[in-house]
Image (cartoon, rainbow, N blue to C red):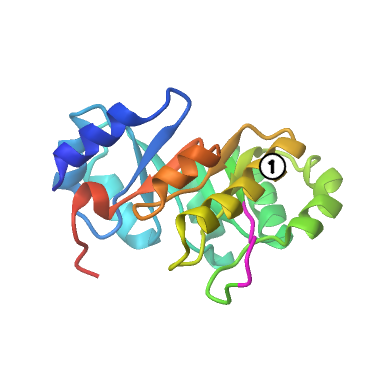
Amino acid sequence: MEISNYLQIKKKLPINVNLLAVSKGFGSQEIKIINNEGQNDFGESRFQEAIEKKFLLKDFKNIKWHFIGRIQSNKIRKIVQNFEYIHSVDSYEKLLKISNVSFQERKHPLIMLQVKFSDDPSKGGFDPKILIEQWDQIKEFKSIKIKGLMTINPKGLSSSQNIKLFQKCRNLADSLKLPDCSMGMSGDWKEAVEAGSTWLRLGSIIFGKRSY
């Protein structure tokens, strides 16, 4: 557990940048330690693992759970029931289903739309042009609040390449009048802050090396 890293990063962040501690692959004990330092937002990408931790930490009322993994359609109801934020909505069809399920469940999740700004076959996401075309319809969806955009840069980019892609995300969010950009991870968070990120998804730099 790299608690000193966490405290140093928190100290450096501008007031409008939120830190999302990516706790996938780490146990409830590590979450408790960092929660005691004032960290309330935690990101999980494996549903079953997240639910087990959520149960173990049910008495920690200030914890907010964020789903950041690839969304399977058959898990949407459970995700809506258990997560306050969903960062990884990568298609119109899934967003529509989340809206319908949220209405049925009387939930109002906060949504980040995942957008793809580079040709990376390992990543999903909206095509920026298609998102703009669909935006008027998307704005009418019920029982969800779209807070911003989320993006994941390919690995192995230079610092300037990272900034350039992150700036595309920030510019698109601004054009859609969305306040938030969920972008930047342990390897590129400084570039993401420079480009206008409001949510950093940091895991290994805080918790140490994962077991998977």
- Residues in magenta, as a range: 114-119
Please report the residue visible at 25 percent of the width from the left and 70 percent of the height from the top: 212
Tell me where residue 134 appears, x and y as whole percent: 83, 53
Q: How many discs mark residues in the rendered view?
A: 1
**Residue beneath label 1, please?**
171
Residue at image location 80% in from the left, 59% down from the top: 130
Q: Residue at x 84, y 47 (%)?
A: 137
Instruction: Name the spot of residue 91 as percent of width and height, x first.
Output: 68, 61
Most distant residue in the top direction: 15
Magenta residues, dominant SS class:
loop
In the picture shown, does residue 50 fall above or below 180? below
> Is residue 79 shown in magenta?
no
Relative image position of residue 123 (x, y in whole percent): 55, 69
Q: Is residue 41 above or below residue 88?
A: above
Where disc 1 sits, the SS reads: helix
Vertical placement of residue 200 versus 74, above or below: above
Looking at the picture, tell me which residue is in the foreground, 87 or 107: 87
Give the class, few, some or many, for how many residues have Cα within 10 Å of label 1's Cα (few <14, many ≥20).
some
Q: Where residue 199 appears, x then y in whole percent?
A: 47, 39
Left or right of residue 51: residue 102: right
